[in-house]
Amino acid sequence: MSTLPIHKKYNCQEASAVYFKQFYLACLAHASYLIGADGEAAVVDPQRDVDQYLAEAEANGLQIKYVIETHLHADFVSGHGELAARTGAEIVIGERAGATFPHRAARDGDELQIGRVTLRLIETPGHTPEGISVLVIDQSVSDQPRKVLTGDTLFIGDVGRPDLAGAKGYTPETMAAMLYDTLHEKLLKLDDAVEVYPAHGAGSMCGRNLSKETSSTIGQQRSLNYALAPMSKDEFVRMMTSDLPEQPAYFSRDAEINRAGASALADLTRPAALSPEGVAAFAAQSGNVVLDVRPAADYGAGHVPGSINIGLGGQFATWAGSLILLTAPVVLVAADEQQIDEAVMRLARVGIENVKGYLSGGISAWRRAGQEAAIIPQISVAELREMIGAESAPQVVDVRRPAEYEGGHVPRAVAAPLSHLERTLAGLPLDPTRPTAVICAGGYRSSAACGLLARQGFKHLYNVAGGTGAWQGAGYEVEATAAK
């Protein structure tokens, strides 16, 4: 997934300008930043692959002086170590992070200087204990901040979930109370005109109601953000700790990788080209994962038996981290070697570094070698509706998240969220011998679920192309489930 940059220069004086750029990585819903002035720069919350920051700084005559982490990210592996190694920059992170790499431990009110710009660091715990926000102050204009980079403390439309630090001795209730104080005693004390730039947007699992907008102002959030509405601390804590979405399995591991600092991407070994026979032998070993990164339709038309499908066209890294153990040996199946390189890099972004090889020549080579290709028919919502009305109707499995399912689903569909499908399958009212139609919002998650169900012995699977969105768009009947 390409990075979608948003940048602006604002004139401080006619003689020069302060440089500010947001890099938005859509597949991880992650925003990082480059701030520069007078030949110096800081990068905030960098993604694992750091070449773009280096190229941008060089193009604008900037030397990266600081790499700032607003907190220990759980949903991706940061590139702070590699960026510091390649530039000589100092890494700055909150003192409560317990970081084991060389760094400056940030305390409330600390200031960093890049040319005429002062970066004032304020401790903003609540999402994590060590969270900091960065106030951007152009001293040639005013001693008051014009922007604040809020990490995962304050999002556009939401605030950070408070349950990611539980393993370190903090309860969600404790963290939510800290978050309330942070919001009301620090961030909401800022002027309404201060621009807000968070570390994540819609699609991130670090919050619940994130907007598709990637920036806002304090004033707009004061008016529109549900979590900033007037309420007591007790009310806020109850709201923030109720009905939290399940935490993806890889989050705690990624946070620990970031605490120690990840290796450089260049240090990763490129996966080996494997013959069909080699892939078949690999797939036969328990614990190994054959990951097919092609679109759902291509996967359905023919794939390595036992493989799972997580297409590069969706939230690839997030779902890979959720469905694959970070330590599991992986072999890739793709359309070409360019996709292999992209998949390796994107897997590394969430800490999956154990890619052993890839199927040389793709599925065409697999078939030419006489290997059997498994098939999962792709059906339209019209075909599903017709099948449901037949005497031998299939069981329908909806693999969306609970809130999506409750908002409207195909009648009599069984709720089986993809993130924990394999763990909960035994307790679901499903018969592996019956025809099974799998549905999600659009056909992406359901394709992944088909691969998982096939590995559990389901023989007659159908992937519903277009998903529930197409079902509702066609005007077909849906059932809604009252939220508990």
Image (tube, helix red, strand yellow):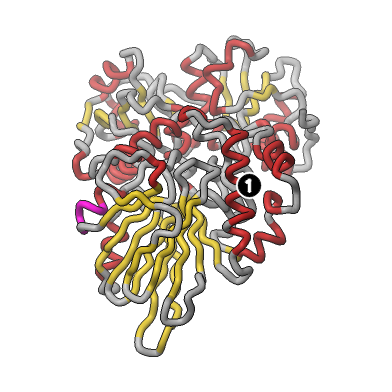
Question: Image quarter for residue 388?
Answer: top right
Please name the residue that numbered disc 1 is placed on.
Answer: 180
Q: Residue at x 28, y 49 (%)?
A: 103
**How many discs appear?**
1
Q: Residue at x 67, y 19 (%)?
A: 394
User: Could one spot residue 465 in this view of the protein?
Assistant: yes
Residue 100 location, x and y as percent?
A: 28, 39
Q: Residue at x 47, y 56 (%)?
A: 122
Q: Is residue 325 left or right of residue 152?
A: left
Residue 377 location, x and y as percent?
A: 54, 28
Question: Image quarter for residue 359?
Answer: top left
Q: Is residue 6 magenta?
A: no
Question: In the image, is residue 176 above or below residue 284?
Answer: below
Question: In the image, is residue 137 above or below residue 298?
Answer: below
Residue 50 location, x and y as percent?
A: 29, 54
Give the amino acid type for the residue marked by disc 1 in the picture.
Tyr
Residue interval drawn in magenta:
83-87
Q: Is residue 85 magenta?
A: yes
Nearest the eye: 203 or 145: 145
Nearest the eye: 23 or 156: 156
User: Could one spot residue 340 in this view of the protein?
Assistant: no
Q: Is residue 228 left or right of residue 299?
A: right
- Magenta span: predominant SS is helix
Q: Is residue 138 left or right of residue 160?
A: left
Q: Residue at x 45, y 71 (%)?
A: 137
Residue 357 location, x and y as percent?
A: 25, 30
Decide: few, some or many residues near mark 1? Use Cα within 10 Å; few <14, some 14-19, many ≥20.
many
In terms of secondary structure, where does tag 1 sit? helix
The C terminus sits in image quarter: top right
